[in-house]
Image (tube, grey):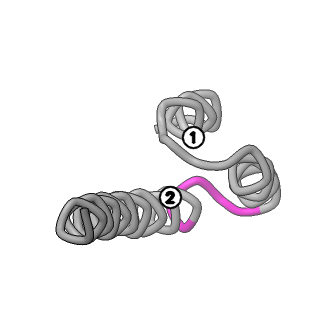
Amino acid sequence: MGKTQLYEFIDAMILPPDAKALARKMVKHLDEQPALLLLIELKDKSEKLAQLLEVMENSLQHTSSLKR
């Protein structure tokens, strides 16, 4: 996988702009293999965070509906 593809991989991820900027810097300064491994880890962590945020949001919705 070339660096161009790594940048495309970053662009496809749902991340805050500052996290994408850091990921791009990482790709620029590392070899392709270690950069890819770190990007895969970042993608996994961001997906888990998105799931947790969804659970929290659903919990808040249920809590506020119980108070009514």
Please indicate, yes or no, whether residue 54 appears anywhere in the rendered image. Answer: yes
Question: In the drawing, does residue 44 fall left or right of residue 37?
Answer: left
Residue under the image location 44 percent in, 66 percent down: 37
> Tag on residue 10?
1
SS label for mark 2 = helix
- Please provide the residue range marked out in magenta: 30-34
Who is closer to the viewer here, 60 or 18?
A: 60
Distance from label 1 to label 2 (Cα)? Answer: 8 Å
Please identify the dominant SS of the magenta region: helix
Q: Is 1 above or below relative to 55? A: above
Judge the density around disc 1: few (<14), some (14-19), many (≥20) Cα neighbours within 10 Å: many
- The reply to whether callout 1 and callout 2 are in contact (CB within 8 Å) is yes
Residue 62: horizontal and vertical position, in percent? Answer: 19, 64
Q: In which quadrant of the rendered image does the C terminus lie?
A: bottom left
Three-letter code for the amino acid on which mark 2 is drawn: Leu
- Between residue 60 and residue 68, name the one nearer to us: 68
Classify 40 as above or below 2.
Answer: below
> How many numbered circles are shown?
2
